[in-house]
Amino acid sequence: AILRIMRSKIVLSLLLLPCCAGALLLGAVRCSTVPTVLDLVLQERQRYEQLFGLELAVCAGATPHDGLLWRGGAGAETALDRCSSVRRGFAQICEASTAAGLVEAVRQAGVACETPWTVEHVPLWSTLRAGARRDDHWRFSGLALALAQTVAGPPALLGASAAPDSCVRFGVLEGETLRFGVLRKGVRGAGAADRDAHWAARPFKFSGALDAEVSRAIVNIVVDSRSDATPPPRLFDPCCGSGTNLWAAACRGGSVAGSDRDAAKADGCRRNLEHAGVAFDDIGVRDASRDALPAASDADCAVLNLPWGEKVRQTHGENDRILANVAAHLRSGTPVACLATDGGGRDWGRLGYEVERAADVTPGTTKRGKASFDGAATCYLLRVR
């Protein structure tokens, strides 16, 4: 009898596996259509769109689906918590081509919520590109009222902006079609915001530093490109500057080491990392174009923000010498994320690399109309030969 009971429980658990996966995505929501995939809504950053897309492809196995919506892969849950390129996660319940059709699809799915809920409108075009609506014969306020009469369970009275975190947040994603589902936030939350604010108040700064979200994307790309992405990363940055890339890598755990030819920047990097509470193996004063780089031999990934010749000077052919010297000190197969402005005609094979992917960062502008510090560049995902 005991064996029969155990067999019946095993069979029941196997039958419920898909439902359990959907329950994890939906939380307190119940419906007849259980989603099995967590999609990702990209941040609206036109100039970083390609870079963020590369981050999602590498880190989440995601593929572009509809404007800012990416179809999540095996790493979608992790990417939601880790990638600054991700605005929200989205567990889709139903889809329709019109607002009336969406309300009917929600009714057919029998959507019910055990806790107070709210609903948000999420356009999937980039407002920076002023995308045109596919169908402008409806208003979200009317759709939200119709959904309130269709979804079983009490809607929150304060609306989406003032609703507490305990509320379930539905979303209506407007792109080529209308999609209804549950919006998910990552767990980076206030802790990550506090870390970012603390790093923004670092003691040493200079105008050529990267944006924190750009550094985070570059680090995520190279760390998740390792042949074995399971252990904590050992990351090396031979042009570390003020240390933003090293700080972003340390936020993922593991160890970091770096160097810079400018003694003032190397000292500033050490002070910045100490300010952020980041332990580091070594921050030395070394010229990456010619000096020995002992910390590179232990690294399983590297980032390289080459001198652009604007805020950081460079001589003719210097960047090629940096690349060749770094490749000579890294082990074969080591992934390298390289940000460069002059890589279009470069012979990467001669320098010791294979190019796996590339993503452009388009120019920005300041209030004075001048190109901002991180102008136009390309992020290359390389692998040492």
Image: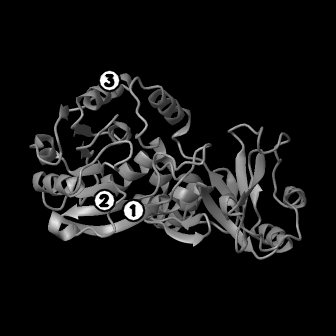
Q: Which residue bears the numbered disc 1?
A: 58
Q: Is residue 186 left or right of residue 205?
A: right
Quadrant position of the C terminus in the picture: bottom left
Measured in 3D between alpha carbons, the distance from the residue under mark 3 to the one under mark 2, in whole angstroms, is 29 Å
Q: Which residue is mark 2?
A: 225
Q: Earlier in the sequence, mark 1 or mark 3?
A: 1
Q: Secondary structure at mark 3?
A: helix
Which amino acid, by three-letter code, is at mark 3?
A: Arg
Q: Position of residue 228 (x, y in %)?
A: 24, 57
Q: CA distance from mark 1 to mark 3?
A: 32 Å
Precedes in sequence: disc 3 or disc 2: 2
Q: Nearer the viewer, mark 1 or mark 3?
A: 3
Q: Are marks 1 and 2 in contact (CB under 8 Å)?
A: yes
Give the side of residue 349 with respect to residue 203, left or right: left
User: Height in image: 203 above or below 66?
Assistant: above
Q: Nearer the viewer, residue 263 or 183?
A: 263
Which quadrant of the figure has residue 22?
bottom right
